[in-house]
Amino acid sequence: MNCGLGLGAWARKKSANAFFPPSRKRGRELPIFHYPSFIIKQAYQRVVHPARVALCCCIALLGASSLAHADAHDDFLAAIAQLPAATYTDKNEIVKRLVVLQQPGTKRILQALLEGNLYARTVDGKVFIAKEQATSLQLTDATTQADAGLAESAGFEKIGTNNGLRKTLRGAIAQFDLNNADDDVRLASVKEMLRSMDEETVAILRSHVAKESNRTVKTAINVGLAAADIENTDPAVRVKAAETLGKSLNPDAYNALQALLTKNADGKFTEADDDVRYAATQAVSRINFWRSVYGFLETLFFGMSLGSVLVLSAIGLAITFGVMGVINMAHGELMMLGAYTTYVVQLVMPNHIGASVLVAIPLAFLVSGIVGIAIERGLVRFLYGRPLETLLATFGVSLVLQQIVRDLFSANNRPVETPQWMAGSWQLNEALSITSNRLYIVLFMLIVFAALLWILKRTKLGLNVRAVAQNRAMARAMGVRSEWVDALTFGLGSGIAGVAGVALSQLTNVGPNLGQQYIVDSFMVVVFGGVGNVWGTLIGGMSLGVVNKVLEPYSGAVLAKIFVLVALILFIQRRPRGLFPQKGRAAEQP
């Protein structure tokens, strides 16, 4: 019997026994389909029952979540309802509770409270976000964010704030922006939170720093946490915090380190641990070093911006002086005309301030250029070869132009609005920022300089100007009408002076005496760089501007100008014709 069973039957028996126990009825097995109730029971135990248990667990979890959400919403409604009658201390606690609850619309409510737009209805104390409209209020339900229509303001009372509460509100609103996708928003949020550091804020920042991807934001968080750790009771933590703060140029970090090195009334250091004081000393030294480096770079930039103004104001003078030998004392007033042209253009285009400056540049060139040609044709051309008379005559013209401007615009200074695209500054780090208007002036000077070089090198007018400058008699012999070259050259130099006035209008107020501030410096640049040499004017103007700004922190603005003037006089004694003397002028001298 056993041998006849066979391997196949034995395997089927073992497989059946694994799921279905063998029947003892009549001492033999029954086929599988004879066990329907047993099959259902085993399937229920192995498949259905675990799924049912899992489903019940999910339902329980969802129920618990719904209950928790409902509880949070109830707490939110209760907190909002408490605001009208709460004291300022209680309001601070309510604000912190609202931040923890994180219910929809919370940020808008806090923002309205900060801006003074949160009101309570006097009848029932219900809270609304309101926008004032004459004697009525445009209402929005604070809890549902639904529009509540218009209502008379007499039936509502504003929920008040004080300085402490406003500080808490700003920090609370910042926490909502901590997860914003915009890096700038997150950075502003971190900076706002650092202004009101407490244990809760520190905990939030510690949990956020690990997932922060932006380097600047992460650095700001680490510096803030280090500033908090500087008060830790563990010296090792304070040492590490001091080392972290030493890598930052933030003023708050510097002040926190300095506090560790101060002494109390007894002459003892406020920080008792020697290792912490040593770490703080090293950190302060490092910050001072980098501050001095970036301060020097900022001074160089200011010098370059001043030098750019000097180049713009002197380059037109260099052309007229180099070609015609005319000392034009009205050059500053031609700059003034360019500045007033900018002012007039802004009056005509009050709604397009950004475009007004761009429109003013060619107009200032035309206005100053036409006035310059009129001066040359009407007065200067009769005084060639007589430099003293030319000087006195152009000085008289400058006085006439000043008086005309006073009659037209009065003697008061006129403000010229800076366009939005030129406003502000580029913050490279916490110790170095570059003001946008000065940077644009440097770029503008380079563009004007390049355009002038192109005119002198690539146009017929430029060829004639260079020919007359090098040898007037030979140029006349070759058919060049030198009188028209003189007029156009004077107009070109005057037009560039007008363009310089547009740049000056972005740095200072526009007034009748604007040009007098720069005429002496312009002549210094021309003499230092070399009469009639545009490259010499560029190098001379930038050099004088940088030297002035480097000396100012040590000697003051007035003494710095005196030192530069004395140095220039000594330089002229050794090199009377400047850095880059012109090489053609001597050819026409007897």
Image (cartoon, rainbow, N blue to C red):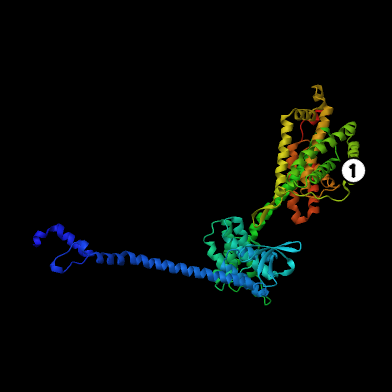
Q: The N terminus is located in which quarter?
A: bottom left
Residue 256, x across and y down, in percent: 63, 67
Residue 528, x across and y down, in percent: 78, 41
Mark 1 — residue? 404
Is 131 displayed left or right of 397 in the figure? Answer: left
The relative height of residue 500 versus residue 155 in the rendered view (above or below) is: above
Q: Secondary structure at mark 1?
A: helix
Report which quarter residue 342 is drawn in: top right
The relative height of residue 419 versus residue 319 in the rendered view (above or below) is: below
**Which residue is more in the foreground, 221 or 454?**
221
Q: Residues within 10 Å of mark 1 (few under 14, many from 20)?
A: few
Q: The C terminus is located in which quarter?
A: top right
The relative height of residue 366 versus residue 54 in the rendered view (above or below) is: above
The relative height of residue 201 versus residue 571 in the rendered view (above or below) is: below
Is 553 displayed left or right of 104 in the figure? Answer: right
Residue 194, x across and y down, in percent: 62, 65
Is 424 displayed left or right of 26 in the figure? Answer: right
**Which residue is more in the foreground, 483 or 157?**
157
Viewer can see residue 283: no
Is 312 displayed left or right of 246 in the figure? Answer: right
Q: Amino acid at mark 1?
A: Ile
Viewer can see residue 367: yes
Report which quarter residue 226 is drawn in: bottom right
Residue 89, x across and y down, in percent: 66, 75
Report which quarter residue 383 is drawn in: top right
